[in-house]
């Protein structure tokens, strides 16, 4: 009896010791996973950041090339490449052209995408799902396939080598409609019904109820539309022939020679072309993350 009592008395002493050991092992395992995860994330971040850093270093290294091993620190840092860039390229004009096309494309895409998304989200009509699916399928058609028929069509209307010819194919975007429709589907229909009881029509519901509730998605689409137009190269190269209508990517491509290329000047132009996009993304970063998360794209 006394022996049984002794064993029972020992149990509480052993159990806490094992629990503490298990907790210590679990904490060490969690710390190991956390260290491994952060290590992988840091390596991934460095891999993503390195091309931008190399671009900046090359732009500050006079006479630098791409055939040699990348240098992490410029040997003789200089801004000569930026000075030569402004001497060889009418930079203010090409930046102005790119900015004009990007701003108009962004505003028109917001308008067309929002109205089309409202129709697909709120207006019941026969074949709505099929039409929406067909429209989404157009995202799988690359621009390279459409260049020839688009050019022939714009040439027939006399729009080649004009701003309007460069803008027309960018006015509607299937991705924008998809993104905004997903955001509108998250807005409760009861808000529409309450507004309708107050006498609101579709335009008022769209303007005062829907749009204020999808601001993150609108900001996301604005960033994507601006970025797509700002970096667009193929279509402006095909449709804009006059030098005074050139955009920034086309002008930067013109700096590459047939036999030799002054990569420091090209990289200087690349650094300057990144700055507007970087500023816009930093300004709208919160809305972009929220908008993508609400659309279920993360």
Image (tube, rainbow, N blue to C red):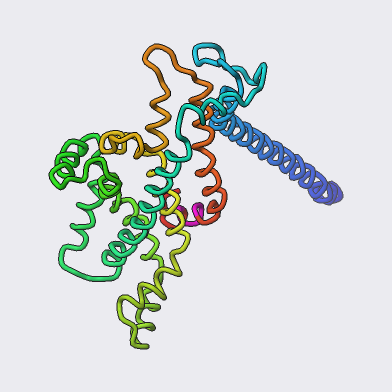
Q: Main secondary structure of the magenta part?
A: helix
Residues 108 and 166: in front is 166
Q: Can you say whether 72 is above or below 128 in the image?
A: above
Magenta region, residue range: 288-292
Q: Is residue 27 left or right of residue 217?
A: right
- How many circles with numbers are drawn on the protein? 0
Quarter residue 244 falls in: top left
Residue farthest bottom in this picture: 198
Tell me the residue at 15%/67% (across/down).
126
Against 20, residue 128 (above or below) is below
Picture layout, residue 86 above or below residue 125: above
| Residue 224 placement (x, y as % from top left) | 42, 48
* Front-lying residue, 140 or 74: 74
Q: Position of residue 48 (x, y in %)?
A: 53, 32
Counting from the top left corner in percent of width and height, residue 21 is at 75, 40
Task: Tell whether position 289 is magenta.
Answer: yes
Q: Residue at x 27, y 49 (%)?
A: 164
Tell whether position 86 is magenta.
Answer: no
Task: Indicate the position of residue 206 as horizontal and vertical percent values.
Answer: 35, 72
- The residue at the far left in this view is 156
Residue shown at the point (60%, 20%) measured from the top left:
61
């Amino acid at each position: 009896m006394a022996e049984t009592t002794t064993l029972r008395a020992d149990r509480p002493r052993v159990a806490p010791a094992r629990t503490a050991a298990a907790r210590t092992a679990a904490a060490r395992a969690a710390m190991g996973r956390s260290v491994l995860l952060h290590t992988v994330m840091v390596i991934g971040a460095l891999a993503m950041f390195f091309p931008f850093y190399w671009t900046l270093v090359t732009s500050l290294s006079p006479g630098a090339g791409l055939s040699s091993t990348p240098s992490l620190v410029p040997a003789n840092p200089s801004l000569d490449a930026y000075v030569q860039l402004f001497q060889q390229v009418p930079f203010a004009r090409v930046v102005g052209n790119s900015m004009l096309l990007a701003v108009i494309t962004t505003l028109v895409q917001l308008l067309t995408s929002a109205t089309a998304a409202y129709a697909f989200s709120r207006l019941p009509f026969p074949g709505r799902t099929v039409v929406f699916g067909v429209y989404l399928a157009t995202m799988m058609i690359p621009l390279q396939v459409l260049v020839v028929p688009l050019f022939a069509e714009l040439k027939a209307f006399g729009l080649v080598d004009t701003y309007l010819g460069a803008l027309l194919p960018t006015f509607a975007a299937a991705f924008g409609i998809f993104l905004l429709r997903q955001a509108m589907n998250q807005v409760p229909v009861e808000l529409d019904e309450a507004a309708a009881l107050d006498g609101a029509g579709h335009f008022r519901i769209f303007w005062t109820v829907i749009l204020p509730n999808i601001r993150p998605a609108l900001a996301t689409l604005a960033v994507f539309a601006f970025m797509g137009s700002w970096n667009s190269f193929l279509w402006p190269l095909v449709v804009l022939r006059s030098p005074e209508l050139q955009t920034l990517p086309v002008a930067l491509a013109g700096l590459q020679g047939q036999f030799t290329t002054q990569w420091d000047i090209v990289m200087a132009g690349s650094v300057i072309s990144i700055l507007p996009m970087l500023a816009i993304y930093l300004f709208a970063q919160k809305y972009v993350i929220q908008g993508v998360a609400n659309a279920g794209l993360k």
